[in-house]
Amino acid sequence: MASRPASSTATTACRAQSGDCGFWEWCDDEAEPYMKQQLLLDLRNAMWSAREQVNGLEAALRDRTVAQHNLQSTPKKESNEVQGLRAAVEKMEAANCVLVDRINKQQTCIMMLVYVLVAVVVLLVGTMYLKL
């Protein structure tokens, strides 16, 4: 764009708006240094704010990811513990069955010994009465 005096620019803009030349031309005057500095400061502050928001969102995402991972790993740990406890119970039940069988065999042996002892006592008492 060619630089034009301010009055010429305004006139061209008015003519362009009314459809005189077929296009819209807009030219602003050069911004003051204070405006430039203020604009840059506003841009910097907006960037800092955006970075803080992004950092906050990233931290929230990390927290949720960790929480979700903990929730997913907790049932696995619990299911592993439950499976371990079930295996321990099965081993104890198997050992219990073996012990119950041994106790039953010992009770059978004790009962047989009691019958034999009673038979011997009956025989001894019977022989004593026969001798008298």
Image (tube, rainbow, N blue to C red):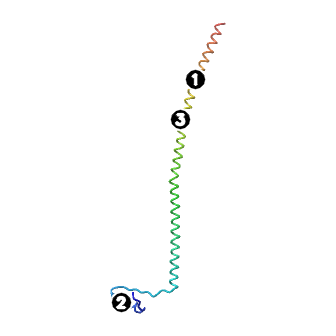
Q: CA distance from mark 3 to mark 2?
A: 102 Å
Does 42 sit left or right of 127 as displayed? left
Does 4 sit left or right of 88 as displayed? left
Q: CA distance from mark 1 to mark 3?
A: 23 Å
Secondary structure beneath dot 1 equals helix
The correct choice, above or below, for 83 with respect to 105 in the image is: below
* Badge number at residue 94: 3
- Is disc 3 surrounded by few (<14), some (14 to 19) or many (20+) residues within 10 Å? few
The reply to whether the C-beta atoms of the residues labelled 3 and 2 are less than 8 Å apart is no
The correct choice, above or below, for 6 with respect to 111 in the image is: below
* Residue plotted at (51% across, 56% down): 69
Disc 1: which residue: 109
> Can you tell which quarter of the image residue 116 is in?
top right
* Badge number at residue 15: 2
* Residue plotted at (51% across, 65% down): 58
Check disc 3 and give the amino acid type.
Ala
Give residue 8's position: percent from left, percent from top. Answer: 40, 92
* Residue plotted at (63% across, 10% down): 127
- Is disc 2 surrounded by few (<14), some (14 to 19) or many (20+) residues within 10 Å? some
The correct choice, above or below, for 115 with respect to 3 in the image is: above
Mark sitting earlier along the chain (2/1):
2
Between residues 116 and 33, which one lies in front from this camera angle? 33
* Residue plotted at (61% across, 12% down): 123
Check disc 1 and give the amino acid type.
Cys
Between residues 112 and 27, which one lies in front from this camera angle? 27
Mark sitting earlier along the chain (1/3):
3
